[in-house]
Image: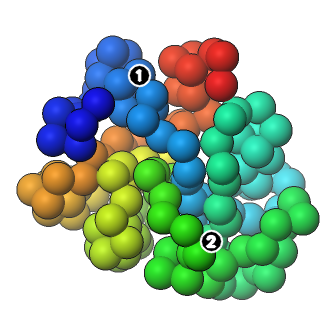
Amino acid sequence: MPPDEMPLDPRSPDELRAVLAEVRRIAIVGVSADPSRASHGVARWLIDHSDLDVALVNPNLDELFDRPVHDTLAELPDPVDLVDVFRRSEHLAGVIDESVAIDARVVWAQLGVRDEVAAARARAGGVAVVQDRCLKVDWAQLRPHG
C-alpha cells in the first residue's frame, strides 16, 4: 500500500491488517531486560514468532537477546517501518517526534499509552499512529502467517 493510502488512525481489523502488511522492520522503544515486564516478553515473542526484523532501544541497556540495544531511535543503523512504544504516556510525544525525525511510517503505543495531541501532530505529517493496543496480540491475530 502506498504511504499516502495507509490509514493514519487505523482502528478496524482491516485497517490494522493493512498497516501491518507493510511492516518489515520495527524498533521497540523502552524494551526491558526484566522478564516480568511486558516489553521484554513482547520483544522476545516478536523476535521468535514473527518475520519482523526487530531493533531494540533503551539507553540503559547495551545488549538483549544477543542483539545490540541502541540509546535512541536516531542511532539505529537502518530505517524502521514501525516504532513500538513501551514508555508511559507522558513520554509518548517525545518518542513520536523521534519517530517522525527518522521517517518511521507507524508509531504503535502499547496498552494504556496515549497522547492525542502528539498523535494528531504525527498524523498531520503522514505518520500512522495506533494507541493503546498490543502489537504482539494484533500481530498474532492479524498476521498469523508471520
Q: On the image, numbered disc 1 is attached to which residue? A: 17
For the question of whether residue 79 can be seen, the reply is: yes
Task: Answer with left or right where residue 109 lies relative to residue 41.
Answer: left
Q: Is mark 1 on a helix, strand or loop?
A: helix
For the residue marked with disc 1, what is the amino acid? Arg
Q: Callout 2: 10 Å neighbours few (<14), some, many (20+)?
A: many
Q: On the image, numbered disc 2 is attached to which residue? A: 57
Does residue 89 sit above or below 23 in this rendering?
below
Q: Is mark 2 on a helix, strand or loop?
A: strand
Residue under the image location 23 percent in, 43 percent down: 3
x then y, percent, for residue 28: 59, 59
x then y, percent, for residue 95: 40, 70
For the question of whether residue 117 can be seen, the reply is: no
Task: Answer with left or right where residue 102 lies relative to residue 74.
Answer: left
Residue under the image location 47 percent in, 81 percent down: 74
For the residue marked with disc 2, what is the amino acid? Val
Task: Answer with left or right where residue 13 lies relative to residue 62.
Answer: left
Determine which quarter of the picture holds residue 52.
Answer: top right
Task: Answer with left or right where residue 119 lies relative to residue 18.
Answer: left
Residue under the image location 49 percent in, 59 percent down: 80
x then y, percent, for residue 4: 15, 41
Quarter occupied by the C terminus: top right
Residue under the image location 53 percent in, 26 percent down: 138
Residue at the extreme left of the image, as rendered: 124
In three-dimensional space, the C-alpha distance between marks 1 and 2, rounded to whole angstroms, equals 25 Å
